[in-house]
Amino acid sequence: MTEGSLDQETLLQHLGEEEKPHGAVVPPIYQNSLFTFKDFERFQSGFNWGASEEFVYSRLSNPTLRVVEEKLAMLEKTESALLFSSGMAAVSSAILSQVSAGDHVVAVDVLYGPTFGFLKNYLPRLGVETTFADGRDPEKVREATQDNTKLVVLESPGSYTMRLQDLQAISAIAKERSITTMIDNSYASPIFQTPVDFGIDLVVHSATKYIGGHSDVVAGAICASKKQISRLRAEELQYLGGSISPHAAWLLMRGLRTLPMRMKRHEATANHVAEYLLTREDLNGVFHVSLPNNPQAELYKKQMKGAGGLLSFLPPTQNREWVKAFCEALELFAMGVSWGGFESLCVPVKAKPLDWDRPQWVVRLYCGLEDPEDLVADLKQAFAKASGSG
Ligand SMILES: Cc1ncc(COP(=O)(O)O)c(C=O)c1O
């Protein structure tokens, strides 16, 4: 059997695991900081940090990490991948790898908060400015570019209002101007969206989410060309040192084995919950990428293969007390950040995309692996309590 003939789900179980020390069915955790050599020349070649295949020091590479990196690159259809200690280490390293003092970045308005903060508040200290644009309109992204723009930062879908960006249109605009594109693909996971199919250069993940999948590991990854990954390894990983531990990488390997099936289940449950929310006339909006009435439904069909477990709604009132009562009444949806694990979650947040004239309360739900009917029943009783009828 050749790798090319095998399905993604088969490769996820076996790729990178051809060597089986002692026949161990699960690759061991190489819990070591350094590797020793008998051969002088091999040791010397190992110092070529970016390009070397040798394992020298676990800040830069390690056999347990490599298994996961091979699987991630396969899933994202990139030549290479690099793990980091967190999603934010991956995000900030990806951005820093593309900019120098005097450069400019264009970013969409629906970014994860710390990514937004890094661009808006931190990068100006290094002489890099960012313009934020409404990512739903590629022309707005084009208008925001300048002669010194080096990078376009995307996050599609955005994880509160679930807005998409047209990856193909934006990457074409960027390519005309030799601008690199990067996307945070944590929402969709590589199972439901492979951005390089649409010309995106750097694909970043908070692997803490679906890839880890069990709410027990914080991790990040960048998937890109061999050239980009060698440079990231030799510079951002080497200098900033946001390296993942072998144990955390091993947890990602375990999570990856069930990623496709988990994604399908999260999606089915979120669709079920969305259908229920749509029956509630008191809500001021339901945001779920795969709904037929989503104004971006065509784009969703073009660039995503599924929706995943996230959705959100605008509550019946912007009264803080209602939001508090609803969230505190939930029993299965726990109030907590992040997503991708087994447990359903709820995040009340004040969102303000560029086109809203004021921040509004949005309640984000993440549908875990519980029974879908139990989750709907939990929502029903929380709505009843918050509205004073329960
Ligand atoms: C969309 C998105 N990107 C990146 C991150 C950062 O990832 P991490 O928490 O693994 O650093 C998060 C975390 O919640 C996120 O929601």
Image (cartoon, helix red, strand yellow):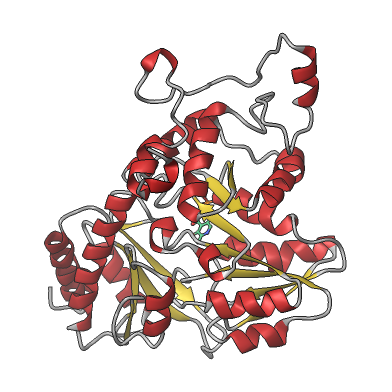
Q: Quadrant of residue 217?
A: top left
Residue 112 screen position, x and y as percent = 54, 65
The quarter of the image holding the C terminus is bottom left
Q: Nearer the viewer, residue 136 or 160?
A: 136
Residue 339 screen position, x and y as percent = 38, 56
Q: Is residue 130 above or below residue 64?
A: below
Residue 49 screen position, x and y as percent = 75, 34
In percent of the image, x 65 and y 41: which residue is there? 242
Q: Quadrant of residue 258?
A: top left
Please indicate, yes or no, whether residue 108 appears anywhere in the rendered image: no
Please indicate, yes or no, whether residue 55 appears anywhere in the rendered image: yes
In percent of the image, x 53 and y 81: which residue is there? 353
Residue 108 shown left or right of residue 215 in the figure: right
Q: Nearer the viewer, residue 24 or 341?
A: 24
Q: Quadrant of residue 50?
A: top right
The quarter of the image holding the N terminus is top left
In percent of the image, x 36 and y 45: which residue is there? 6
Residue 358 shown left or right of residue 280 in the figure: right
Q: Nearer the viewer, residue 374 or 52?
A: 52
Q: Is residue 186 above or below residue 22?
A: below
Count of marks, rendered view: 0
As drawn, the residue found furthest toward the top would be 38
Residue 150 screen position, x and y as percent = 77, 69
